[in-house]
Amino acid sequence: MEAAVTISSRGAERLRSGHPWIYRSDVRDAGQAAAGDVVRLLDRSGRFHGKAHYSAASQIALRLLTAADEPVDAAFFRRRLERARELRDRVVSDTNAYRLVYGEADELPALIVDRYAGWLSIQALSQGMDRARPLLLELLREMYVARGIIERNDARVRELEALPLESRVAAGECPEVVEVEMNGLRLGVRLGSGQKTGAFLDQRENYAAAERYARGQALDCFTYAGGFALHLARRCASVEAVDSSAEAIAAARDNAARNSLSNITFIEANAFDLLKSCDEQRRSFDMVVLDPPAFAKTRGHLDAALRGYKEINLRAMRLLKAGGVLVTCSCSHHVSEADFLEVVASAALDARRRALVLERRTQARDHPIALTIPETLYLKCFILLMG
Ligand code: SAH
């Protein structure tokens, strides 16, 4: 029998509102629960509220696995993984690189599994999921004919769970660069060392959306491995792609070559400086993409983050021709869609430009948003027509 943890009425209320996290301040009695255990959740009157993973370190003490009184065993995880797969079968096309499991949204809290062609990349981001790794690996090997499974447990959030940061090939083999297909493009991905689990899979549908408006001269700021730039290059006369990381620029160049695209100029530079100097030189573009890293890593950085978004959006708008299109993104969890829209609107006012929202977008559907879990929505992407 699993250990029982008593939660406060506020904790129970949170579960009832459809949110799977219970903070430590709402744990009344952790009883015999140890790090990474599956525990039974009870309120003070002894009523059962479900089963959760217990963390002995994080402020998120409990992550709900199920509201039912059912065994949390191999069959349980298999059902969850199969349901996650069914959703992807319905919403993913035009790629062999996508997110198979998106944590809380798939009721597999703190678990990420990404597919890159014949390889799987997995991240276990809580003590409970970390302990379940051998079982999860076995299930994934049964369910998928994978050439290799990589564990990217080097994400910094594991520090909050007092878990070690490590990256390893857990099954099969893994070449340094794996080639995947996306929207008809070939992309090389470094599964062992790339950012996130190797690529920004969440932008896949936004790449295709941006491409539909692309023409003339485009500027892709924060290009990483060239995701937006490559898509735009298929329609534009020329694309300039900027990133401050030499490694990212090298990967982006390699991707352009893989697709025989020769109309992209890659620039290793600080995007803030580059936008400023384009403005000083009175350059103009038909499309500008802004996809910066999360400026607000914590709530405390919110003000500085909003200033950062304002600055790049203002500068980008000044560079756009009348009739030009701005694709502007924010992946900061702490910046809401409303906050972001307000900043972009204030940039348009300062730039004295009229802007129309052509598309109001978010992360690709293989990163589903759970209606009662606001944290599952993090990527904001607006496509604006500049007057
Ligand atoms: N658009 C990319 C993802 C961008 S991630 C895609 O679709 O794949 C953010 C990128 O911004 C990273 O590659 C990082 O190296 C780069 N970056 C961070 N700070 C920067 C800065 N000040 N100037 C330019 N690039 C920066």
Image (cartoon, rainbow, N blue to C red):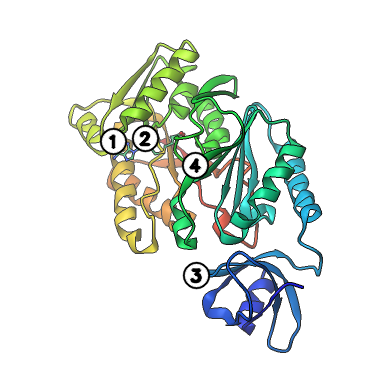
Quarter location, residue 10: bottom right
Quarter location, residue 56: bottom right
Which SS class for mark 2? loop
Quarter location, residue 301: bottom left
Q: Which residue is mark 1?
A: 271
Q: Residue at x 33, y 54 (%)?
A: 305
Q: Are marks 1 and 2 in contact (CB under 8 Å)?
A: yes
Q: Which residue is mark 2?
A: 222
Residue 179 visible in image: yes
Which SS class for mark 1? helix
| Mark closest to the chain's N terminus, 3 or 4 | 3
| Mark closest to the chain's N terminus, 2 or 4 | 4
For ligand 1, which image quadrant applies?
A: top left
| Mark closest to the chain's N terminus, 3 or 1 | 3
Cα gap from disc 2 to disc 3, whole angstroms: 32 Å
Cα gap from disc 2 to disc 4, whole angstroms: 25 Å
| Mark closest to the chain's N terminus, 2 or 3 | 3
Q: Which residue is mark 3?
A: 59
- Residue type for callout 1: Ala
| Mark closest to the chain's N terminus, 4 or 1 | 4
Q: Which residue is mark 4?
A: 167
Q: Where is residue 186 drawn, in percent x and y?
A: 55, 19
Comparing 109 with 91, the one in front is: 109
Whether disc 2's CB lies below 8 Å from ligand 1 is answered yes
- Residue type for callout 2: Phe
Q: Where is residue 47 drawn, in percent x and y?
A: 76, 83
Tell me if residue 237 comes above or below residue 30 in the rendering.
Answer: above
